[in-house]
């Protein structure tokens, strides 16, 4: 075959086109540390149709240590999936969605917030211990197995049915705290976090005692308990006589311990709880011969909505608005 100049040009063009397609396939559309979310990762991935006018949030993902951008409602789906059992009632999931949306709006710089204070440029991070949990579709699939599609649809319903709604107080997004299970009452915010806030008072949370996370317990040998304390504070405890060295100084109105003295060192129970990895600050000590057991009621700091309590209220027929207004006093539920 003879190649004419036209033929060579044509072949070169085809080659160029082929190379450019290959390059596109291999390159990421964004810098490695900043990726857009929402592209299906697998052929059978459920494709998310997103409203282009929708609010976009930026999240620092602790799992892959990347800052990602995604539509608000897509972000919330991952939050609810990570923060609340999908088996909970729809109204409880809706209450959780409004709480989660309020948390991020409160932090977004465009609404006067300061973002996630651990990760610059992020509105929010994916850690439950800092901002709020967020999980990916892959993680949902792992967690849920064959329930994946049904659970996802249920959570997407909760997100869509509360679209754009947040809790406000004096026309501002409130600062949101919520937890897994209370000890029967929620905690005053100033007992756990620095500032008092008018919408956080201690309220009854009935039904939490039937929740699976209600009772907890940590047992340590006396020696181990003492070692942990000494390595943190440099205070040596008499391992043979722990009962005489642990003194509860005061309780909060909700029945949790406020201050405790251990080996002469006075501290907040919230700090003590973290030191020993306890579920809550509602602690009962049981002293054995060689061991100490710390029994707890409730799971979490106790401030704001109890998720178990929200589910119980939903079972009793309360709407998500009634649930929220029970746990967050005087708030309005409105579009932001
Ligand atoms: Zn954060």
Image: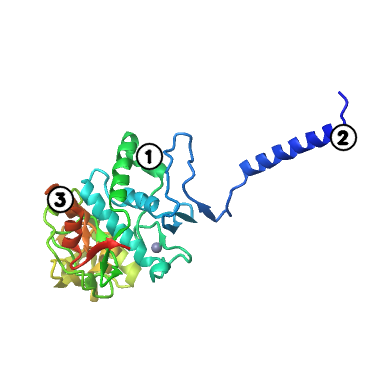
Tell me the SS state at disc 3: helix
Can residue 72 be seen here? yes
**Disc 1: which residue:** 141
> Viewed as shown, does residue 117 lie left or right of 181?
right
Q: In x, y percent, where is residue 156?
A: 32, 45
Q: Name the mark on residue 5.
A: 2
Q: CA distance from mark 3 to mark 2?
A: 79 Å
Q: Earlier in the sequence, mark 1 or mark 2?
A: 2
Q: Name the mark on residue 100.
A: none
Q: CA distance from mark 1 to mark 2?
A: 56 Å
Q: In x, y percent, where is residue 280?
A: 22, 61
> Viewed as shown, does residue 158 lie left or right of 314?
right
The quarter holding residue 243 reads bottom left
**Disc 3: which residue:** 312
Q: Residue at x 48, y 37 (%)?
A: 42
Report the image quarter containing ligand 1.
bottom left
Tell me the SS state at disc 2: helix
Q: Residue at x 22, y 57 (%)?
A: 299
Q: Quadrant of the C terminus?
A: bottom left
Q: Earlier in the sequence, mark 3 or mark 2?
A: 2
Q: Residue at x 41, y 59 (%)?
A: 125
Q: Residue at x 32, y 53 (%)?
A: 163
Q: How many numbered discs? A: 3
Which dot, 1 or 2, sits closer to the camera?
Answer: 2
> Does the residue tagged 3 have its C-beta within 8 Å of any atom of ligand 1?
no
**Residue 289 position (above or below residue 38):** below
**Residue 214 position (above or below residue 303):** above
Can residue 296 be seen here? no
């Amino acid at each position: 075959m003879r190649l004419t100049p036209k033929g060579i040009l044509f072949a070169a063009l085809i080659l160029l086109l082929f190379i450019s397609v290959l390059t596109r396939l291999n390159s990421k559309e964004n810098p490695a540390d900043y990726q857009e979310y929402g592209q299906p990762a697998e052929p059978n991935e459920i494709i998310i149709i997103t409203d282009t006018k929708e609010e976009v949030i930026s999240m620092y993902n602790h799992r892959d240590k990347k800052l990602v951008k995604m539509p608000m409602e897509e972000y919330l789906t991952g939050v609810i999936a990570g923060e609340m059992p999908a088996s909970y009632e729809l109204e409880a999931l809706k209450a959780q969605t409004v709480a989660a949306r309020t948390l991020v709006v409160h932090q977004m710089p465009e609404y006067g917030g300061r973002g996630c204070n651990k990760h610059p440029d992020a509105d929010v991070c994916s850690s439950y211990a800092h901002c709020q949990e967020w999980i990916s579709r892959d993680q949902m699939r792992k967690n849920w197995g064959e329930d994946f599609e049904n659970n996802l649809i249920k959570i997407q319903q909760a997100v869509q049915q509360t679209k754009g709604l947040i809790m406000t107080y004096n026309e501002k997004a409130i600062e949101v705290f919520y937890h897994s299970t209370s000890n029967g009452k929620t905690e005053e915010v100033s007992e756990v976090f620095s500032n008092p806030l008018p919408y956080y008072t201690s309220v009854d949370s009935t039904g939490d005692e039937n929740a699976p996370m209600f009772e907890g317990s940590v047992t340590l040998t006396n020696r181990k308990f003492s070692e942990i304390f000494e390595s943190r504070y440099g205070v040596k405890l008499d391992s043979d006589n722990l009962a005489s060295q642990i003194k509860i100084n005061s309780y909060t109105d909700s029945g949790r311990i406020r201050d405790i003295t251990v080996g002469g060192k006075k501290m907040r129970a919230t700090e003590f709880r973290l030191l020993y990895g306890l579920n809550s600050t509602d602690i009962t000590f049981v002293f054995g011969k060689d061991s100490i057991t710390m029994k707890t009621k409730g799971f979490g700091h106790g401030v704001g909505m109890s998720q178990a309590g929200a589910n119980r209220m939903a079972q009793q027929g309360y709407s998500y608005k009634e649930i929220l207004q029970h746990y967050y006093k005087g708030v309005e539920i409105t579009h932001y």
